[in-house]
Amino acid sequence: MNEIKIFCPATIANLSCGFDVLGLCLTTAGDEMIIRKSDVKGVRITKIVGADLPLETENNVAGVAALAMLEEYEREFAPIAIGIEIEIYKHIKAGSGIGSSAASSAGAVFGINELLGQPFTRKELVKFAMQGEKLASGNAHADNVAPCLLGGFTLVRCSNPLDIIKIESPEELYATVVHPQIELKTSDARSVLKQTVSLKSAITQWGNVGGLIAGLYTKDYELIGRSLHDEIVEPLRSVLIPGFDSIKKAAYENGALGSGISGSGPSIFALSKGKETADKVAAAMSAIYDEIKLPYEIHVSKVNEEGISIIK
């Protein structure tokens, strides 16, 4: 194989109670990438369509992730005898809160891994993709790149050493995500967070994390909904998102199990049982932003259990 074309799905991170440890993979939104072997040594970003992002390898999240992977490949296996060219077709807007940088970072390492004959497992690729996230936000977090690579829900139990658990979702679980057309940088959204939390808030938060995981495993939709509550981060970040309280209220009133900030925002997600309810929630969210005349994009998606996939 000398060239591969892949779909790199969008993701929802945090899921209210799971800051930096929980994420899920979407089906209906994502980027495309073409990665090919080249006679020119090194990693080159040759084309970016749909976003104004740097082509310089060291300044692009896909390039940084690729370099991290190839460095370990040469150390573990053999010197690289080929070069790599990467084309990126962005459909996930930067700063949208649905894993734009993660899609590029994860896509780069997945594609190169395929061209090299899969020397690394998908789980092993996560640590390389995290280096792209570090460039984007200053923090090497895995809550977006893990579901992007593995699919489904993922729990990052530990970052050092990396320990990731994939969790399959209930069959009827759907996500609705609305992205108001403003950019909110992850680094800016992190700057409003406190470095310490009260014991009371922490107890509530880890109870909700446990409840959400239990709800997914037991397919208890009501427990999933009760657990989608953020005691720590959402109160600080929600003020950065226009119409947040109205969107969340509308989601609940139209049958959503729960809702919250997607990643660092400004996107807002809701989880629902069944596509009919998810579509109803989408209509209610849309009505809020139509009323305040704020442009937006909206997605209704089943949970993507596969993650990154090859486009035939």
Image: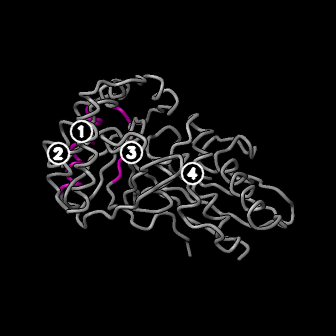
- The answer to whether residue 132 is left or right of residue 196 is right
Question: How far from the left and from the top, in percent, is residue 237?
Answer: 36, 27
Residue lying at 33% horizontally and 47% vertically, measured from the top left:
177
User: Which mark is nearer the camera, 2 or 3?
Assistant: 2
Q: Which residue is mark 4?
A: 90
Q: Which residues are magenta?
A: 277-299
Question: How far from the left and from the top, in percent, is residue 128?
Answer: 62, 53
> Dividing the picture into quarters, in which one does residue 33 lie?
bottom right
SS type, badge 1 = loop
- Three-letter amino acid code at disc 3? Glu
- Which label sits on residue 195? none
Q: Earlier in the sequence, mark 2 or mark 4?
A: 4
Vertical placement of 311 versus 56: above or below? below
- Three-letter amino acid code at disc 4? Lys
Q: Earlier in the sequence, mark 4 or mark 3?
A: 4
Colour scheme in use: one colour
SS type, badge 2 = helix
Q: Split into 4 quadrants, where in the image is the N terminus?
A: bottom right
Q: Earlier in the sequence, mark 2 or mark 3?
A: 2
User: Which mark is nearer the camera, 1 or 3?
Assistant: 1
Question: How far from the left and from the top, in percent, is residue 46?
Answer: 75, 54
Q: Which residue is mark 2?
A: 226
Q: CA distance from mark 2 to mark 1?
A: 7 Å
> Dividing the picture into quarters, in which one does residue 244 lie?
top left
Q: Which residue is mark 1?
A: 229
Q: Split into 4 quadrants, where in the image is the C terminus?
A: bottom right
- Within 10 Å of the Cα at label 4, are there few (<14), some (14-19), or many (20+) other Cα atoms? many
Q: Along the line of sight, which residue is nearer the eye, 197 or 237? A: 197
Q: Is residue 217 magenta?
A: no
